[in-house]
Amino acid sequence: MSRIVYVNGEYVPEEEARISVFDRGFLMADGVYEVTSVLKGKLIDFAGHAKRLERSLNELDMAAPCTTDELLEIHRELVARNAVTEGLVYLQVTRGVADRDFAYPKDTTPTLVLFTQHKTVVESPAASTGIKVISIEDQRWGRRDIKTVQLLYPAMGKMMAKAAGCDDAWMVEEGAVTEGTSNNAYIIKNGRIITRQLSNDILHGITRAAVLKFAEEAQMVVEERPFTIAEAQGADEAFITSATTFVQPVVSIDGVEIGSGAPGPLALRLREIYVDQSRKQAI
Ligand code: PMP
């Protein structure tokens, strides 16, 4: 069944959606994006995603295509038109259309595209089995805090993981884990949750912020600092977070089982809290 997608002010069937070949998103990956999960037809942490979008746009001197209220309206309209009960809304803003030139063109109109995807997010099999990760060098650019559409290295990382019979990759820079290819990375040792501190080296995950807040409210201790693959392999538990995976246990790293080799109790508890709270706070 064809979806209704949103392109620059219009709701159109996906087959009729058009973007210019001169769009800088296409030519130069000059664009940013957000992914917001949908549960029971409602948006999870829309405010967090809208705020990070604004930050990404500001960092790149890119004009906002519309107000946050208008964005919320478009999200809701697409969820309704496509009858999404569980899944996601993908949003992309690019600098717009101009003759090819490295310098930012002046006064282009930003391109705004949104579409939905149906996806089982709560009862995903990986949540109960956990995932296996490999480690790879982090060879991305140095502004990973900006959520740009230049996702080729993360895509390569996922393929390397697949070739190794695993599910994902954790990226390592100067001996320490930065993050997963499309998620933030955590380990748990002696009840303490350890995850890399925020900087330009990682994406400031919206799920990360929510999960750390819930962890502290549940009296869990959070330590924001770098950790190595060796430390992770010796941890009691490991997990990842992202908007579409929520909290997902990691059961092995580079072939070494973490803890018992099964999803850990704290990671599963955090997932439960996150799903519960998200259901309550979804809009
Ligand atoms: N790090 C990277 C590199 C990502 O691509 C993502 C998801 N887009 C995340 C972390 C998690 O961010 P969020 O919780 O906002 O989905």
Image (cartoon, rainbow, N blue to C red):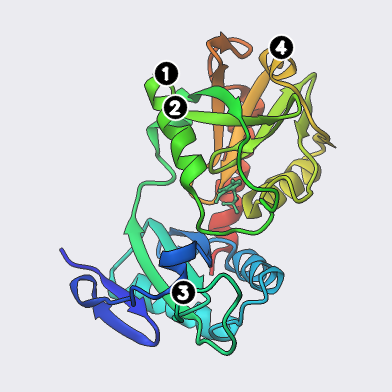
Query: Is 86 above or below relative to 42?
Result: above
Residue type, mark 3 in image: Arg
Quote the CA–CA distance across marks 4 and 1.
Answer: 21 Å
Q: CA distance from mark 3 to mark 1?
A: 39 Å
- Crowding at label 3, few (<14), some or many (≥20) Cα neighbours within 10 Å? few
Please tell me whether residue 160 is drawn above or below residue 278 in the rendered image: above
Q: For residue 281, what is the image quadrant?
A: bottom right
Residue at left offset 57%, top offset 90%: 107
Nearest to the eye among marks 2 and 3: give it. 3
Q: Position of residue 61 (x, y in %)?
A: 67, 76
261 or 33: nearer the viewer: 33
Q: Residues within 10 Å of mark 1 (few under 14, many from 20)?
A: some
Query: In the rendered view of the protein, which quadrant contains the N terminus?
Result: bottom left
Judge by depth and name the residue closer to the eye, 193 or 107. Answer: 107
Q: Which residue is mark 3?
A: 100
Residue hosting label 2: 160
> Rounded to the nearest whole Å, what is the CA distance between mark 2 and mark 3?
33 Å
Which residue is under mark 1?
164
Q: Give the structural element (helix, strand or loop) at label 4.
A: loop
Q: Nearer the viewer, mark 4 or mark 3?
A: 3
Label located before the other in sequence (2 or 4): 2
Q: CA distance from mark 4 to mark 3?
A: 50 Å
Marking on residue 234: 4
Q: Nearer the viewer, mark 3 or mark 1?
A: 3
Left or right for 176, reference 256 = right
Q: Secondary structure at mark 1?
A: loop
Circle nearer the N terminus (4, 1)? 1
Three-letter residue code for mark 1: Ala
